[in-house]
Image: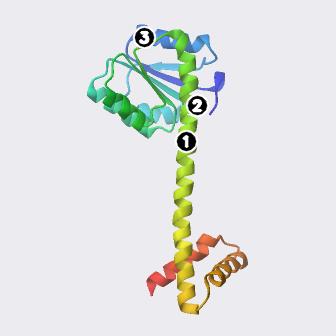
Amino acid sequence: MDSGDTLHILLVAQDAARAMIVCDGLKRGRYSDVTLVSDMAGLIRRVVADDIGVLLIDLQTPSAAALEMTLDIARAVDRPVAIFVDISTAADTRAAMEAGVSAYIINDLRAERIEPIVDMAICRFDAQKTLRNRLADTEQALKDRKIIEKAKGFLMSRKGMTEDEAYRLLQQTAMNQERRLIDVAQGIVHAVDLL
């Protein structure tokens, strides 16, 4: 994630005084590329189209509907999101964290805290993204392993091979055909499924 002057920040705030606090805090630090909007209409499209790096949303005293809409936005954009509220319940805080909000700041909107909050939101977002990627890779590796095991099982039963022989045949076929092992195994599994 970029940082500093190259990072485009979108601030959504309806209250002008609160917006000025956030903008002042951003511009005191190294975040000078800030766009201020007052409503959330078309926000997801704007985040993507304008290549927004960080989304800051000031809800002040959110209604349940406003908070839910904000959390839907946080789920939809693959960006660090920081939300500022004056009051919150434990359930609202939990919902924000589960929605992927990088920073949920309750009752502490001060200019001198804005830059560290943005820094923390970026770091937390990056850490969460790394974990999501690792989880996805692990899940894919497990799916691939199951397919390879199924293909080996078919080769063992149909050709009377040992497990090692079946695996070596899959490997050799993948090398000869310049394909990935999983693709060869998937082909065998598909063929078996057709029979």
User: Residue 30 appears at what percent x and percent y?
Assistant: 64, 17
Q: CA distance from mark 3 to mark 1?
A: 30 Å
In this view, the mark in front (3 or 2):
2
* Mark sitting earlier along the chain (3/2): 3
Q: Residues within 10 Å of mark 3 (few under 14, many from 20)?
A: some
Label 2 SS: helix
Residue type at mark 2? Cys
User: Height in image: 49 above or below 144?
Assistant: above
Residue at 53%, 51% in the rendered image:
135
| Residue identified by numbered label 3 | 18
Q: Residues within 10 Å of mark 1 (few under 14, many from 20)?
A: some
Question: In the displayed image of the protein, which residue is found farthest to the top?
Answer: 17
* Mark sitting earlier along the chain (3/1): 3
Label 3 SS: helix
User: Residue 184 appears at what percent x and percent y?
Assistant: 60, 76
| Residue identified by numbered label 1 | 129
Q: CA distance from mark 3 to mark 2?
A: 24 Å
Residue at 60%, 10% in the rendered image:
28
- The disc label shown at residue 123, or none: 2
Q: Nearer the viewer, residue 48 or 96?
A: 96
In this view, the mark in front (3 or 1):
1
Residue at 65%, 25% in the rendered image:
6
User: Residue 74 appears at what percent x and percent y?
Assistant: 43, 34
User: Residue 68 appears at what percent x and percent y?
Assistant: 32, 32
Residue type at mark 1? Lys
Label 1 SS: helix
Which quadrant would the N terminus be assigned to in this image? top right
User: Height in image: 143 above or below 20?
Assistant: below
User: Height in image: 104 above or below 27?
Assistant: below
